[in-house]
């Protein structure tokens, strides 16, 4: 294939045609959600070795490749996709990836992509405003002092959490950047915290042992009453609490920790409060559900994935700070080729990120917002949360099924009831469902017990799909 504009247009038209068809068929619920060939067979079918060596020979070969690729993909747009907490992207939001893929503006320094940089700042202000951390008159006011809060987009929530933890360390122990970690630093986090929290502490050289696990209830929520004694115990041991982490919502059950109460406790002891709201922050858009995040404005930092509930493709996450100075102090490094005085009409985000080169991530959220406006996204979140309650009720009303808890978000944990009490029954069912490919769901372990788990990410998933799913499970269990 040539690299001129005509060839691009031809290829793009062909691919867009195929993608439109893929979207139509998936949305109609035709075909399987997922077909998993053995890796070797798939590589052969995709003709990978030959294409890598010689390139795609002609249009026919290109068509074959795209067809095979799409056929062997996870069909997120299929209403029976009820699996991981990953966006079913708004088709219009995919345009961001197309534009970025061609113009490639890594905008962490303003001059490498002014439009993308301005868009990132603006959508970050939009997010800060939802939390109550933006004080400017307009989200397009870039006077940093007026903003008060600050934030930056990262390639994913794990990186966003790492960034927040580094910022918290810079506050608690400014000397750590140069001298290394003092031995007395600890982080308090629920035992149910996402694994990336403990992984971050290891990456930061603090070691897993610096994480003090806070007690959770049988549904993985922080036991608020048990926190204060741990704080006192750690202080008495001579430990310095770098920050306390809470979930909004918890990955397993989708329940929210008591943000308001925990924030007050952190305030009382002057502890940095970080909220991992990767999935659940989007409830801020829904008047019916934002109460789950009550008190969020009292936190010091939080993260918010747009590739979960804001209908963008992977990856786009925000790490947000109540006080922008805490963000500005997080990284204390200089690189002479980038961090030098220059006359620029914009701003450089590079000093606030782990990444050096960074994609124009703000454009993903922008195109998602641009699809139907803020109201469209708000309605989406509201509908998914409300629908999940309806699905929960239906499942729990069945004699042969039982749900773990009333959902707060769009995550449902449940089990198939059977005389076969083996703990691996739910896992066996889940694995069979996925191999058969008519549905895609996950499982989770809560309180040492395995459950089937649904994340209602797809706007097209309706009660009838849940009914079909339960019948699929009954069929699998009886065969
Ligand atoms: C998804 C999730 C993460 C990880 O985010 P990635 O974008 O997958 O890196 C962290 N914490 C919570 C609570 C999550 O739901």
Image: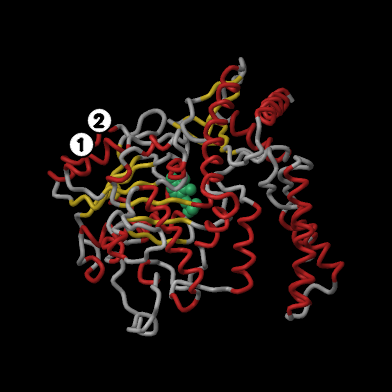
Q: Secondary structure at mark 2?
A: helix
Cβ at disc 2 under 8 Å from ligand 1: no
Q: Is residue 88 left or right of residue 356?
A: right
Residue 44: percent from the left, percent from the top? 79, 61
Q: Which residue appears at 40% of the width and 74% of the height? A: 346
Q: Which residue appears at 44% of the width and 75% of the height? A: 110
Distance of label 2 from label 1 (alpha carbons): 7 Å
Of residue 362 and residue 394, the one placed in the foreground of this image is 362
Residue 216: percent from the left, percent from the top? 34, 33
Q: Secondary structure at mark 1?
A: helix
Q: Which residue appears at 43% of the width and 56% of the height? A: 318
List the single residue furthest toward the front: 137
Residue 39: percent from the left, percent from the top? 71, 56
Q: Label 1 neighbourhood size at 10 Å, few (<14), some (14-19), many (20+)?
A: some
The circle drawn on residue 228 is 1
Of residue 193 and residue 88, the one placed in the foreground of this image is 88
Q: Label 2 neighbourhood size at 10 Å, few (<14), some (14-19), many (20+)?
A: few
| Residue 2, above or below 476 | below
Image-quadrant location for residue 97: bottom right
Of residue 376 and residue 38, the one placed in the foreground of this image is 376
Image-quadrant location for residue 1: bottom right
Count of numbered tags: 2
List the single residue furthest toward the right: 60
Image-quadrant location for residue 329: bottom left
Q: Is residue 246 left or right of residue 29?
A: left
The circle drawn on residue 225 is 2
Residue 122: percent from the left, percent from the top? 44, 61
Q: Are marks 2 and 1 in contact (CB under 8 Å)?
A: yes
Q: Quadrant of the C terminus?
A: top right
| Residue 297, above or below 5 | above
């Amino acid at each position: 294939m040539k690299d001129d504009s005509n060839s691009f247009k031809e290829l793009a038209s062909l691919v867009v045609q195929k993608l439109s068809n893929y979207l139509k068929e998936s949305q109609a619920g035709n075909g399987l959600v997922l077909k998993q060939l053995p890796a070797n067979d798939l590589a052969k079918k995709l003709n990978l070795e030959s294409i890598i060596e010689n390139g795609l020979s002609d249009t026919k070969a290109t068509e074959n490749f795209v067809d095979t690729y799409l056929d062997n993909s996870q069909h997120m747009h299929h209403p029976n996709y009820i699996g991981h907490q990953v966006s079913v992207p708004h088709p219009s939001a995919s345009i961001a990836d197309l534009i970025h893929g061609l113009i490639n503006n890594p905008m962490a320094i303003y001059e490498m992509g002014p439009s993308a940089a301005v868009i990132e700042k603006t959508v970050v202000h939009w997010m800060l405003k939802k939390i109550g951390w933006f004080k400017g008159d307009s989200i397009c006011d870039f006077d940093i002092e007026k903003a008060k809060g600050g934030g930056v987009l990262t390639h994913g929530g794990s990186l966003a959490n790492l960034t927040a933890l580094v910022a918290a360390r810079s506050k608690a122990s400014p000397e750590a950047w140069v001298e290394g970690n003092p031995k007395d630093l600890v982080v308090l986090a629920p035992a149910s915290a996402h694994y990336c929290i403990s992984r971050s502490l290891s990456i930061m050289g603090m070691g897993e042992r610096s994480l003090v696990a806070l007690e959770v209830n049988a549904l993985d929520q922080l036991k608020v009453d048990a926190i204060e004694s741990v704080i006192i115990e750690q202080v008495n041991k001579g430990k310095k609490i770098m920050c306390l982490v809470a979930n909004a919502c918890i990955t397993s059950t989708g329940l929210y920790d008591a943000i308001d109460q925990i924030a007050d406790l952190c305030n009382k002891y002057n502890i940095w409060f970080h909220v991992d709201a990767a999935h659940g922050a989007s409830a801020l858009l829904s008047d019916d559900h934002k109460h789950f995040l009550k008190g969020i404005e009292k936190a010091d930092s939080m993260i918010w994935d747009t590739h979960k509930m804001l209908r963008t493709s992977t990856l786009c996450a925000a790490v947000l700070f109540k006080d922008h100075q805490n963000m500005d102090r997080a990284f204390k490094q200089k690189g002479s080729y980038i961090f030098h005085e220059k006359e620029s009409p914009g701003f450089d985000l590079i000093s606030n990120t782990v990444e050096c080169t960074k994609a124009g991530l703000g454009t993903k959220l922008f195109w998602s917002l641009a699809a139907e406006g803020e109201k469209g996204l708000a309605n989406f979140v509201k509908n998914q949360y409300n629908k999940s309650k309806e699905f929960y009720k239906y499942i729990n009303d069945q004699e042969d099924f039982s749900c773990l808890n009333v959902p707060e978000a769009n995550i449902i944990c449940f089990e198939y009831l059977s005389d076969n009490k083996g703990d691996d029954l739910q896992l066996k069912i889940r694995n069979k469902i996925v191999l058969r490919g008519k549905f895609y769901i996950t499982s989770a372990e809560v309180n040492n017990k395995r459950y089937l788990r649904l994340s209602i990410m797809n706007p097209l998933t309706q009660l009838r799909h849940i009914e079909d799913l339960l019948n699929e499970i009954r069929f699998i269990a009886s065969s």
